[in-house]
Image (spheres, rainbow, N blue to C red):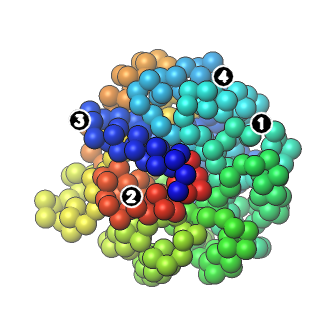
Amino acid sequence: MSPLPVAYAGRMVRSLARRRPVPVFASIYPTFRCNLRCVYCNFPGMMPPESELTTDEWKGVIDALAAHGCRRVSILGGEPLLREDLAEIIGHVRRRGLSCALTSNGLLVPERIGELRGLSTLVLSLDAAGPANDEVRGRGSFEAVKKSIEAARRSGIPVKINSVLSGRTAPELDGLLEFVDRNDLSVTLNVMRSGTPALWRDAASVKESDGDIRRLLLRLAELAKRNPRILFSEATYRFAARWDDYSRDRYEKSDFATNAPLLRSAPRCRAGRCYLTILSDGSVTPCMNTIGQIKGGNVVADGFAAAWRSLRDHDCLRCYAPCLVELDHLFSLRPRVVLNFVLRHLRRYR
């Protein structure tokens, strides 16, 4: 293993060992504009373009993140490449010594690849390796991802795949994993959110039953145990499979009895304590699952320190979204999950 992953993991552990919350990881949404309309996504149009922070304001946010101990910034949307200043934002993240990942649908990647050379990781959204992907994400999106992989490889940018499995794409999982293996990639496998706030357009048409979701998660747990291409740990999928009601994305303190099984079987929510989400207007929320539901301060109006403090005492305890459960396991220093992260993620991605 190269020295860089070891050093990165060491910094993360030292940061987590502090007694005060440290925003080790930040997700930022420079825009909610998008050039696709995925059937399960409620983000396009969530905030008007005029509410977006300016380039200089985002640079100030990144400076504050670095000063408060952040190690990794993930840029999401919407489609981030709809921001003309994206190269400046990425460059500033890297100048501050932070790891920088960007998630894109791929439509604009080949023509803008020169602006992405500073990325630690390019994350491409792909739910199936064929027509099923275009049915849920939009016509031409599969071909766009393939072209983006080629463009990124020519530019030396590490690529991984992020998938959201639904009733339409879960049956195509084997084909997706074959595509990932054939192209020497890794993949994070999520399951479509079920809560009413997440439903947009025709999402209900691709939502699986609770039983099907549970069977899918159990299958993902078995696959994660033996397939090194899958980045999330077996423990994450095992916990998600124990979720009792997939019509709910998350639970707060008032929803639990003190002896509830879900309280005993997973680590405490670390959102707002080890990681946070910053929206296009500078407002903060603990994570993507709490957008529009748990509101904190604003990094521009209130200053980063005050906005960060506003998130620490939220009442959210549990969710089943694999991407968030994995973070909670990781930031709780669960040995097997940390080892999985080092061996599967940090070997290839920074």
Tell which circle, 1 or 2, labels the residue nearer the N-terminal end: 1
Instruction: Give how far apart the Cα atoms at labels 4 and 1 are.
Output: 15 Å
Say which residue label 1 marks. 115
Q: Residue at position x 55%, y 31% from top?
A: 97
Say which residue label 4 marks. 55
Tell which circle, 2 or 3, labels the residue nearer the N-terminal end: 3
Q: Quadrant of residue 334?
A: bottom left
Residue 44 location (% of width, % of height): 65, 45
Q: Element type at marker 1? A: helix
Q: Residue at position x 63%, y 44% from top?
A: 120
Say which residue label 3 marks. 19
Q: Which amino acid, mark 2?
A: Val
Question: Is label 1 in contact with label 3 (beta carbons under 8 Å)?
Answer: no
Q: Which amino acid, mark 3?
A: Arg
Q: Residue at position x 52%, y 56% from top?
A: 1
Label count reads 4
Tell which circle, 4 or 2, labels the residue nearer the N-terminal end: 4
Say which residue label 2 marks. 338
